[in-house]
């Protein structure tokens, strides 16, 4: 699953550690998410969407 | 909290004494030696179990989101793949020793299975971690 988490995070001037703390997950989870190597659970996806003020489908796009 | 630590010590001492006595009862000629060895070998693991049961729930911070971390996914995948490995290994091993008519020491075989399973899970976890890093 592709995503633009890294862009949204850097646009806000947040570090990976800060985002991890906001979401209550490990920093490694953020790293893996940003690289598209880890698909989040639905609750985590909703927390991400809420944090960025966007819909889940705006953050995550299926791979072509 | 003192009550919980007392429970840990009680579990370790009574559990080790019980296991030692049980092991000794199977070897009445060397009851004391057998009971002492088994008691000494089990007291630390039982203490750790007691800590896990009585202390950790109150002292270690509970992570409500632990299942959402990538590390949790790695651990699950490593365990699942290691289980498949062990199943295949035991199946193949059983076929080989059945065909060859080899008789193996049960303790040795079970110990080997436990060690292989633990090492397999650890290696698979490390591989998944390195791959996703």
Image (cartoon, coloured by chain):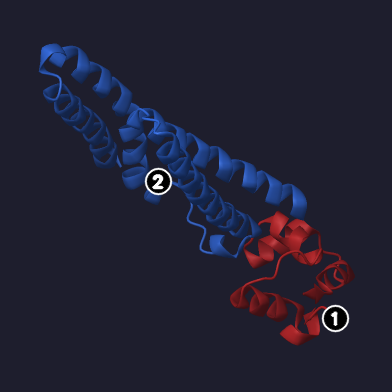
Q: Which chain is home to disc 1?
A: A
Q: Position of residue B100 (x, y in %)?
A: 44, 34
Q: Is residue A5 left or right of residue B5?
A: right
Query: At 24% from the left edge and 23% from the top edge, which residue is drawn?
Result: B39
Question: Horizontal and vertical percent for residue B89?
Answer: 51, 44
| Secondary structure of residue under mark 2 | helix
As measured in the structure, the alpha-carbon distance from the residue carrying label 2 to the one carrying label 1 is 46 Å
Q: Nearer the viewer, residue A20 or B100?
A: B100
| Residue B102 visible, this angle | yes
Q: Is residue B133 visible?
A: no
Query: Residue B108: x and y, percent?
Result: 39, 28
Q: Quadrant of the N terminus of chain B?
A: top left
Depth order, front residue of B92/A35: B92
Report which colour depicts chain A.
Answer: red
Quadrant in which residue A22 is drawn:
bottom right
Judging by the rendered image, the residue that carries numbered circle 1 is: A64
Which shade is chain B?
blue
Task: Find numbered disc 1 in the image and state the secondary structure of the residue it sits on.
Answer: loop
Q: In the picture provided, is A11 more to the left or to the right than B1? A: right
Q: Residue at x 16, y 30 (%)?
A: B18
Label 2 sits on residue: B56
């Amino acid at each position: 699953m592709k995503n633009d988490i890294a862009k949204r995070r850097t646009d806000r001037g947040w570090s990976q550690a800060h985002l991890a703390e906001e979401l209550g997950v490990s920093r490694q989870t953020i790293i893996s998410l940003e690289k598209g190597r880890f698909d989040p659970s639905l609750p985590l996806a909703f927390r991400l969407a809420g944090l960025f003020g966007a819909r889940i489908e705006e953050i995550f796009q299926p791979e072509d | 909290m003192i009550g919980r630590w007392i429970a840990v010590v009680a579990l370790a001492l009574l559990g080790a004494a019980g296991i030692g006595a049980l092991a000794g009862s199977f070897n009445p000629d060397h009851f004391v030696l057998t009971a002492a060895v088994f008691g000494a070998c089990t007291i630390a693991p039982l203490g750790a179990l007691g800590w896990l049961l009585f202390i950790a729930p109150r002292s270690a911070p509970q992570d409500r989101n632990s299942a959402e971390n990538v590390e949790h996914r790695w651990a699950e995948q490593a365990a699942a793949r290691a289980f498949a490995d062990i199943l295949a290994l035991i199946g193949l091993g059983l076929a080989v020793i059945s065909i060859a008519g080899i008789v193996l020491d049960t303790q040795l075989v079970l110990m080997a299975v436990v060690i292989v399973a633990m090492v397999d899970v650890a290696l698979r976890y490390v591989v998944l971690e390195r791959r996703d890093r």
